[in-house]
Image (cartoon, rainbow, N blue to C red):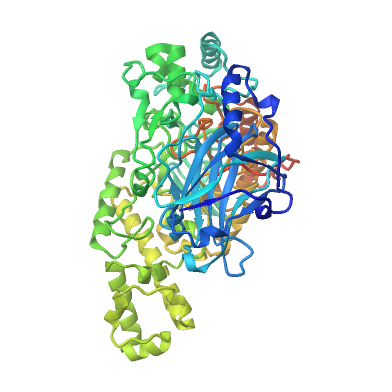
């Protein structure tokens, strides 16, 4: 057990210890007692001033402490959320080889607990502690002996920040308790209690009046006997009447003409897919352990609200001792408050009408299945579960040579059966953001050789090497590895790519074979089950290695999530990797700090006006690119201000938690809709503008 005190010599340039001071503007009048109690208890905290460019605290004692649990109290005194990093360096690297990123709520004292075993890379998303936000473990696996430096770091942000830190404990067991003050941070509607914005709801009467007006002002939905034309230039699907591509067919399909990729809708016209992910009323407001921060939470046994609660499994089986997740839907509760028992059908009408009026033509991934089934808007879906195996090679990468993987692929593909004949379905994603691919330049075959368990994939690799080298002697010389029999490779072998150039080449080649099987086997199973709809790919988080494109020939559309100012760079990268497919952007967003939740998401701007400008710039750059056939915005509604199931709390919605539209974003989506087909056909150039971009607050 070790206790590390915060002392001046540990601080990087610009970070300084300051006197305790509770900023007056951050103390709520109705929380004076709690604020006083926090100040009285603050003797255990050391208060730091961190400049806008960020800073760090050296914690090199953690290099040798066995721990594995590192815990400390922290109080972020800024009105916005903030990021804390545990950076781990090896050798002479200027960038961390591995880091743990944690989000902190504003003006709240909470206890963090990090596990040094996460450095091994097995965990990507860890279970947050009460009062903290999302925890992400990123980088290559690091062994303790190779660590040269460890620091607690605070990245750059839009303004200086003051925070309090308690002594840092390194213990063999996690803390017993995670205390929180009684401090109203969320009002009865699930809104941020400490922030105001134009459409914020303050009463039940205001909520009902606003929702009624939004429904009355929206256009009626089409009916089977009266299919509407959304605008004079668009067909019933949202495709362009002015850009016929093929003869009508039953389903969406891809077309390449004069070097340009297109989606063709069932009427044969050009279709650029735009719309929000998560167009649904998710039960994902994390409330377990957080009741001291809530003005209102109904009894889970109350028949009016019992279906709005949900329990889920912790993010990692290794984290079961931390919390038992309990989720609630303030979105649903607000609609019920306004519309009583008819809330769900009225919400369906309102959202479909609103999206169409604002020029959006697609219900993106994770949207409400019943909403999709209405047939009012084209939609995409995803396999409920990607095929896996009992034993995975690394994180979620399965044993792809196992018969179990092939059987699991067949089972997973069967989920597509109910969609047969559905014209509104554009296609299906196989999965979203494989966790194993979050490690840049990962050699999955090298990890395979390190694996302590036997597997079909390891046996296949040994067979591959035996066929290539014929004798153990040939192999031993090529790999510069003392070995008398190929069966010796069943024992774990670390860092095999460092043995020789030939070893590195063989490992790279077999890694490609494994990734190709990872793609091909589920794709073939899905094609057998559903030959009509488009295979939209894997929604990579980013192209962390060029070999991720292996097996692209099995897709109809290549998909990637792209959080950037524009998607042009990733679209060009995919083309340069010789992927001859249309590309769909599965996720992008922009968040600000002048409304709703207290974090920005992965692309940050200052205001709602800047969000709208950034959205238009991104979508128009996508539509103008010859490979891009759609971009889906993440997400439809703001996330919960205290964090969703995993702790994300971003102001990124087209609508807030009371279903109120952000008008600036609505105007931007309408503008893009009016310009996207002329952009695709080269009649217009993409929009540009100055956007006030700020450092992200995201985890």
Q: Is residue 8 left or right of residue 236?
A: right
Residue at 31%, 62% in the rendered image: 399
Question: Is residue 411 at least partly visible in the picture?
Answer: yes
Residue at 27%, 68% in the rendered image: 454
- Given residues 263 and 27, the one toward you in this image is 27
Residue at 51%, 65% in the rendered image: 441
Image location of residue 31, percent across then percent down:
58, 20
* Figure quadrant of residue 655: top right
- Given residues 534 and 307, the one toward you in this image is 307
Question: Is residue 661 at least partly visible in the picture?
Answer: no
Quadrant occupied by the C terminus: top right
- Given residues 508 and 151, the one toward you in this image is 151
Query: Relative to 694, does residue 212 appear above or below in the rendering?
Result: above
Please identify the residue farthest to the top as the structure is shown. 205
Residue at 47%, 12% in the rendered image: 338
* Figure quadrant of residue 594: top right
Image location of residue 475, percent across then percent down:
36, 86
Please identify the residue farthest to the right as the structure is shown. 690
Image location of residue 211, percent across then percent down:
52, 15
Q: Is residue 504 left or right of residue 468?
A: right
Image location of residue 396, percent across then percent down:
37, 55
Query: Relative to 91, does residue 47 appear above or below in the rendering?
Result: above
- Given residues 642 and 567, the one toward you in this image is 642
Q: How many marks?
A: 0
Q: Is residue 382 left or right of residue 569?
A: left
């Amino acid at each position: 057990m070790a206790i590390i005190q915060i002392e001046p010599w540990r601080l990087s340039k610009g970070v300084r210890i300051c006197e305790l001071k509770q900023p007056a503007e951050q103390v709520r009048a109705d929380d004076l007692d709690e604020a006083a109690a926090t100040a009285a208890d603050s003797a255990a905290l050391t208060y730091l001033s961190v400049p806008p460019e960020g800073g760090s605290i050296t914690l090199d004692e953690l290099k040798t402490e066995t721990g594995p649990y590192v815990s400390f109290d922290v109080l972020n005194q800024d009105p916005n959320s903030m990021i804390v990093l545990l950076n781990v360096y090896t050798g002479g690297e200027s960038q961390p080889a591995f880091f743990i990123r944690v989000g902190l709520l504003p003006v709240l004292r909470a206890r963090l607990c990090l596990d040094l075993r996460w450095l091994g890379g097995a965990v990507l998303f860890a279970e947050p502690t009460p009062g903290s936000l999302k925890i992400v473990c990123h980088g290559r696996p690091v062994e303790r002996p190779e660590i040269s430096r460890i620091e607690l770091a605070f990245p750059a942000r839009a303004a200086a920040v003051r925070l309090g830190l308690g002594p840092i404990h390194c213990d063999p067991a996690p803390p017993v308790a995670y205390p929180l003050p009684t401090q109203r941070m969320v009002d009865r509607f699930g809104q941020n209690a400490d922030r105001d914005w134009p459409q914020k709801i303050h009463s039940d009467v205001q909520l009902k009046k606003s929702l009624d007006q939004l429904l009355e002002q929206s256009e009626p939905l089409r009916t089977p006997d009266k299919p509407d034309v959304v605008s004079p230039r668009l067909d019933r699907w949202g495709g362009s009447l002015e850009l016929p591509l093929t003869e009508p067919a039953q389903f969406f399909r891809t077309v390449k003409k004069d070097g340009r990729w297109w989606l063709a809708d069932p009427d044969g016209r050009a279709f650029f897919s735009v719309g929000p992910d998560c167009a649904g009323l998710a039960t994902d407001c994390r409330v377990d352990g957080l009741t001291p921060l809530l003005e209102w939470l109904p009894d889970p046994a109350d028949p009016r609200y019992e279906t709005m609660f949900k329990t889920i499994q912790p993010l990692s089986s290794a984290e079961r001792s931390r919390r038992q997740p309990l989720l609630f839907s303030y979105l649903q509760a607000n609609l019920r408050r306004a519309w009583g028992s008819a809330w769900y059908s009225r919400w369906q009408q309102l959202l479909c009408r609103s999206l169409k009026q604002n020029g959006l033509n697609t219900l993106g991934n994770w949207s409400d299945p019943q909403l999709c089934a209405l047939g009012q808007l084209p939609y995409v879906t995803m396999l409920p579960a990607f095929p896996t195996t009992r034993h995975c090679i690394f994180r979620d990468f399965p044993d792809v040579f196992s018969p179990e993987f092939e059987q699991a692929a067949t089972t997973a593909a069967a989920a597509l059966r109910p969609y047969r004949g559905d014209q509104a379905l554009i296609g299906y994603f196989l999965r979203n953001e494989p966790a194993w691919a979050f490690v840049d330049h990962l050699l999955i075959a090298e990890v395979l050789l390190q694996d302590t368990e036997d597997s079909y994939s390891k046996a296949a690799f040994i067979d591959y090497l035996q066929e290539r080298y014929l004798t153990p002697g040939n192999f031993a010389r090529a790999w510069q590895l003392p070995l008398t029999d190929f069966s010796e490779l069943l024992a774990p072998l670390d860092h095999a790519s460092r043995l020789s150039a030939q070893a590195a080449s063989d490992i790279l080649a077999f890694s490609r074979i494994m990734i190709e099987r990872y793609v091909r086997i589920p794709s073939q199973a899905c094609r057998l089950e559903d030959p009509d709809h488009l295979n939209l790919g894997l929604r990579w988080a980013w192209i962390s290695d060029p070999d991720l494109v292996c097996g692209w020939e099995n897709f109809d559309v290549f998909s990637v999530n792209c959080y950037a100012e524009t998607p042009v760079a990733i679209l060009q990268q995919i083309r340069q990797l010789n992927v001859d497919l249309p590309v769909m952007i599965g996720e992008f967003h922009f968040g600000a700090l002048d409304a709703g939740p207290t974090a920005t998401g992965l692309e940050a701007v200052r205001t709602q006006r800047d969000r709208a400008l950034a959205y238009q710039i991104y979508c128009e750059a996508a539509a103008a690119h010859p490979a891009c056939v759609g971009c889906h915005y993440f997400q439809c509604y703001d996330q919960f201000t205290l964090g969703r199931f995993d702790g994300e709390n971003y102001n990124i919605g087209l609508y807030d938690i009371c279903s109120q539209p952000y008008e600036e974003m609505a105007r931007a989506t309408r503008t893009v809709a009016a310009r996207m087909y002329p952009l695709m056909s080269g009649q217009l150039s993409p929009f540009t503008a100055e956007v006030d971009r700020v450092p992200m607050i995201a985890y």
